[in-house]
Image (cartoon, rainbow, N blue to C red):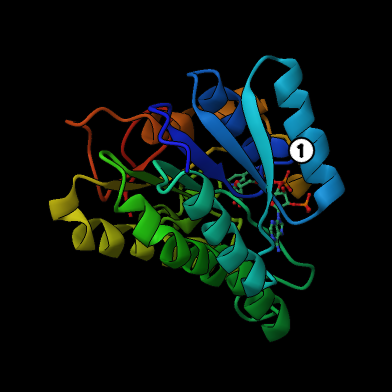
Amino acid sequence: MNSSTASIALITGANKGIGFEIARRIGATGARVLVGARDEARGETAAAALRVEGLDARFLRVDLDQPQTIAAAAAAIDAEHGRLDILVNNAGVVAPGDDRPGQASPEAVRRVFEINFFGALAVAQAMLPLLKRSKAARIVNVSSGLGSLGRHSDPNWEFSAFKVIGYCASKAALNMLTVQLAAELRETGAKVNSAAPGYTATDLNQHRGRQTVAEGAQAAVRLALLPDDGPTGGFFDAEGRLPW
Ligand code: NAP
């Protein structure tokens, strides 16, 4: 087991998009970043690109459709490091057929929940024993402003028309995981928060988002690196606290 003092960070869905940038920025602090990806070739390529930048990055297979890869990832981290300091639940999907509540395909809604909520829950549960061994664990759930019930209740909100029940409800459910896990871990010093990247140009939206990945990663990176007096159980974008 490596008892190094450098932070150990796992980011799911880190082979591209916002997750890759989160890994890059956390790695730049000197942490060892475990580049979670479902596909070995994509994950190895991403980790190699980070190593070229001088970062301590390793690919770790985490496929949210395959629970055995989550268990194997936890076992590998345990064997090598004995703990985990930062978990960023970033992997997420949209699904064709997800739509307004009256039109959405139930299969598409289930598919989005499977990854965005159940997948994040499974990773959090598998990593919890390792996170509890960290002196200052940080868990960041990459949510979305589209998961805000408060924002969706405001007809004047700029994304108010974007009512896609599966995706939005899966992120609202992820926010509930944040609140409940933060309460469960309150006495341990661990901090659990939700990050909203903002509308960011990635494959998820065919690069229609208005922000760069550097901007989209900002809130999650800040929450992953929170000092001991930072918040827990909150929902934040790059500007500050968001309504649930
Ligand atoms: P992206 O470029 O499509 O990246 C998504 C990542 O999730 C990829 O690495 C993808 O891996 C991974 N992934 C998908 N299914 C997976 C599975 N079954 N197991 C493991 N990994 C899986 O999207 P992004 O925009 O960076 O999204 C990152 C996070 O930000 C998501 O949670 C998303 O909901 C959230 N978000 C994005 C925006 C935005 O405007 N872009 C706004 C708000 C929130 P593959 O490459 O193998 O598919």
- Could you tell me which secondary element the residue under label 1 belongs to? loop
Q: Residue furthest front?
A: 1
Residues 215 and 102: in front is 215
Residue matched to label 1: 208
Locate residue 153: give its quadrant.
bottom left
Depicted 63 relative to depicted 217: above or below: below
Mark 1 closeness class: few <14, some 14–19, many ≥20 residues within 10 Å: few
Q: Position of residue 8 (x, y in %)?
A: 47, 37
Q: Residue furthest bottom?
A: 106
Q: Residue at x 83, y 35 (%)?
A: 45
Q: Position of residue 134 (x, y in %)?
A: 31, 44
- The answer to whether residue 153 shows anywhere in this view is no
Horizontally, residue 242 falls left or right of residue 135, namely right
Q: Position of residue 5 (x, y in %)?
A: 38, 27
- The answer to whether residue 140 shows anywhere in this view is yes
Q: Residue at x 48, y 19 (%)?
A: 29
The amino acid type found where label 1 is placed reads: Arg
